[in-house]
Amino acid sequence: MKTAFLFPGQGAQAVGMGKDIAQKYDEAAAVFSDANDIVGYDLRSICFDGPEEKLNSTTVSQPAIFTMSAAILSVMRNKASTSGIVPDVTAGLSLGEYTALYAAGAVSFEDGLRLVQKRGQAMQAAADASQGSMVSIIGLEEDKVNELCAEAAEGEVLSAVNFNCPGQIVISGAKGACQRAADLAEKYGAMKAVVLAVAGAFHSVMMAPAAEELKAALANTDINTSVGTKVIANVGVTYYGDADGIRAGLVNQLVRPLRWQNCMEKLLEEGVENFYEIGPGRVLTGLMRRINRKTKVENVSDLNSLNSLLAK
């Protein structure tokens, strides 16, 4: 019976995350302490006590979510009742792919966190330098979303970038084009269109400057591919092989579409039965419900769910 660990991406953060876990478990407290030293500011206090607008910023939320997920993972690895739960494969949505690589042993905690910090900074800088946005389109198939983008673009950047689950596709591009798409969505049969509260046009060509910065950082990062745990890539829906493939995949993530639904379908087809979502929030648990209603995901996102898992 195969097991997968899933890790959430940006947007899963919430003020207070990890506070009670760190108070109860020394392993988790140590992760937050190490994170503070690595990032060079008090990330722990922002996670635990806010302010919310600071935690929600792209530059802080990405290292915060990575750290929170790693803190839960550290407790699971160190307690007798859960240390035997070892993943055959790991996966993470966007930012979560870095946590997946860490969980698989491909990158160290320090290197993973430094990369995530650089990624957040680079994405924010690229967003500040351009006028971008993202819109979640509910209730349309991919071909209709592509038609919608073609009409709404009017010469500006606009494309489908996040294929999360059936009936939920996120588009990304120039702010004006995104607003036109939101206004036109009903005409194409969408149930609704939701303009997302994000800093910029993530996963589109408007993130090219960030991709170049990240490429340079990845070139100097040690990546270990001799581990037994497989990691599935958001872009391409294939398992990572060598270190260069991982570097290329993480760069491509910033400017190319992410196909989470296809990744989960591939794992299900290949016999994965046990899924654990490790980290803040329940986004991936919710997406799986839409992808395959029969598949249960064990959500480990807070002290109650962690204690429940440890007690099994």
Image (tube, rainbow, N blue to C red):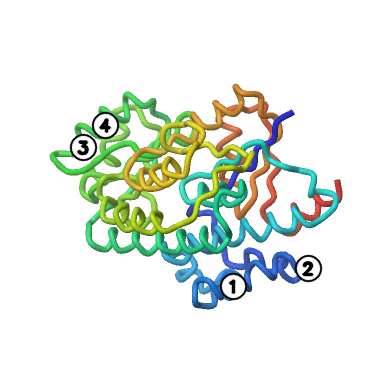
Which numbered dot is residue 44? 1
Give the spatial CA distance, label 4 vs label 2.
50 Å
Identify residue for label 4. 148
Amino acid under label 4? Leu
Q: Are circles 3 and 4 on residues that touch, CB within 8 Å?
A: yes
Q: Amino acid at mark 1?
A: Arg
**What residue is at 61 percent from the left and 23 percent from the top?**
270
User: Residue 305: image x %, image y %?
Assistant: 74, 52
Say which quarter of the image contains residue 79: bottom right
Q: Which residue is mark 2?
A: 24
Counting the numbered discs, the total is 4
Inter-mark Cα distance, 3 to 4:
6 Å
Residue 105 higher or lower than 39, as above or below: above
Q: Determine the CA span between mark 2 and mark 1.
A: 15 Å
Camera-side mark, 4 or 1: 1
For disc 3, the marked residue is 152
What's the distance in space between the residues labelled 4 and 1, CA to CA? 42 Å
- Mark 1 or 3, which is nearer the eye? 1
Residue shown at 62% from the left, 53% from the top? 279
